[in-house]
Image (spheres, rainbow, N blue to C red):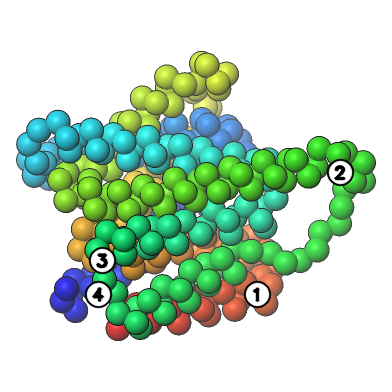
């Protein structure tokens, strides 16, 4: 693989990380107003509409491989995506953020392992860069600060089980994302393309969320007020992140691009530090330094 393709893959992976970080930062506020399920549904809707307009004028559907298999594979990726996303949001809802966040951010470890098992080869320097970057992602997302225990929690024996359930959902999210990005890079994008694969995944997510809303007693009623602009921004940025990430998976090594795209957690932490004045611990600053060091290694 040439230097140009590798550099472009790095840029696209980092672009995906920035867009995902911005989207998650905005989604934090939207979820508190309308709920995680409705936020996920309506942001998928706005992303689907924006991408449909783009593909209509760009002629994106003309490059899809013939047959039913490309569409079926992309639909499977869409189901993996919505399952992993719901697991992630649910882990944030019932678990301890400083624990479930790093666990869910570890998904590139599975993607890298599957990529190498599928025949992808990386040199020693890039391997070190991937390991350093992944360590930095986990450190940047993790908080070691001790928090005062709520007296009600101390007296509530269900606290331990709630923590356990949160970690379980975070592990499910990590496994889902790790398998999905490998599946996208090796089996979906070569057949469907970058943007069309995201379009099918958005459609699959919308349909599945609508079908399961009633059995799971989730509301899809229309939100009111300015929250629409927030949901639209989340949907467009998240969709742009997926398109950039998929383009990177198409051009560069899946193992490298997936790790770089996972930096969205560090982006969200930095945005919280800048706009919400949340303090960063020394371990988080160390994680950010390791991230930049890892990026340099995988870019060489």
Q: Element under label 1?
A: helix
Residue at the location (59% across, 63% down)?
Answer: 141
Mark nearer the N terminus (1 vs 2): 2
Question: The N terminus is located in which quarter?
Answer: bottom left
Give the spatial CA distance, label 3 vs label 2. 47 Å
Element type at mark 2: helix
Assign a secondary structure to mark 4: helix
> What residue is drawn where x is 81% and y is 59%?
147
| Label 3 residue SS | loop
From what the image shows, is residue 299 above or below residue 203? below
Q: Which residue is mark 2?
A: 153
Disc number lying in front (4 or 2): 2
Q: Earlier in the sequence, mark 4 or mark 1?
A: 4
Question: Mark 4 and mark 1: span between their CA atoms?
Answer: 29 Å
**First reached walking from the N terminus: tag 3 or tag 2:** 3
Q: Quadrant of the C terminus?
A: bottom left
Q: Which residue is mark 3?
A: 120
Q: CA distance from mark 3 to mark 1?
A: 32 Å
> Marks 3 and 4: in contact by CB < 8 Å?
no
Frontmost of labels 3 and 2 is: 3
């Amino acid at each position: 693989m040439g230097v140009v393709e590798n550099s472009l893959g790095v840029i696209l992976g980092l672009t995906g990380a920035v867009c995902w970080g911005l989207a998650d930062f905005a989604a934090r506020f939207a979820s508190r107003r309308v709920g995680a399920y409705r936020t996920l549904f309506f942001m998928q809707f706005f992303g689907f509409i924006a991408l449909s307009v783009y593909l209509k004028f760009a002629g994106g559907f003309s490059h899809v491989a013939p047959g039913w298999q490309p569409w079926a594979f992309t639909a499977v990726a869409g189901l993996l995506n919505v399952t992993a996303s719901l697991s992630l949001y649910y882990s944030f809802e019932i678990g301890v953020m400083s624990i479930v966040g790093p666990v869910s951010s570890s998904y590139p470890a599975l993607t890298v392992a599957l990529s190498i098992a599928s025949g992808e080869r990386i040199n020693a320097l890039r391997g070190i860069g991937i390991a350093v970057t992944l360590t930095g992602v986990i450190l940047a997302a993790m908080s070691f600060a001790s928090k005062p225990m709520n007296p009600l929690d101390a007296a509530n024996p269900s606290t331990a089980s709630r923590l356990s359930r949160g970690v379980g959902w975070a592990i499910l999210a990590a496994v889902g994302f790790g398998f999905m990005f490998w599946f996208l890079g090796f089996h979906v994008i070569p057949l469907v393309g970058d943007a069309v694969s995201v379009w099918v995944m958005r459609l699959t997510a919308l349909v599945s969320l609508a079908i399961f809303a009633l059995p799971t007693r989730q509301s899809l009623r229309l939100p009111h007020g300015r929250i629409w602009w927030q949901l639209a921004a989340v949907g467009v940025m998240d969709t742009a992140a997926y398109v950039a990430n998929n383009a990177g998976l198409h051009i560069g090594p899946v193992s490298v691009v997936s790790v770089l795209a996972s930096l969205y957690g560090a982006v969200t932490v930095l945005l919280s530090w800048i706009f919400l004045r949340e303090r960063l611990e020394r371990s988080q600053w160390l994680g950010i330094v390791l991230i930049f060091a890892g990026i340099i290694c995988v870019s060489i």
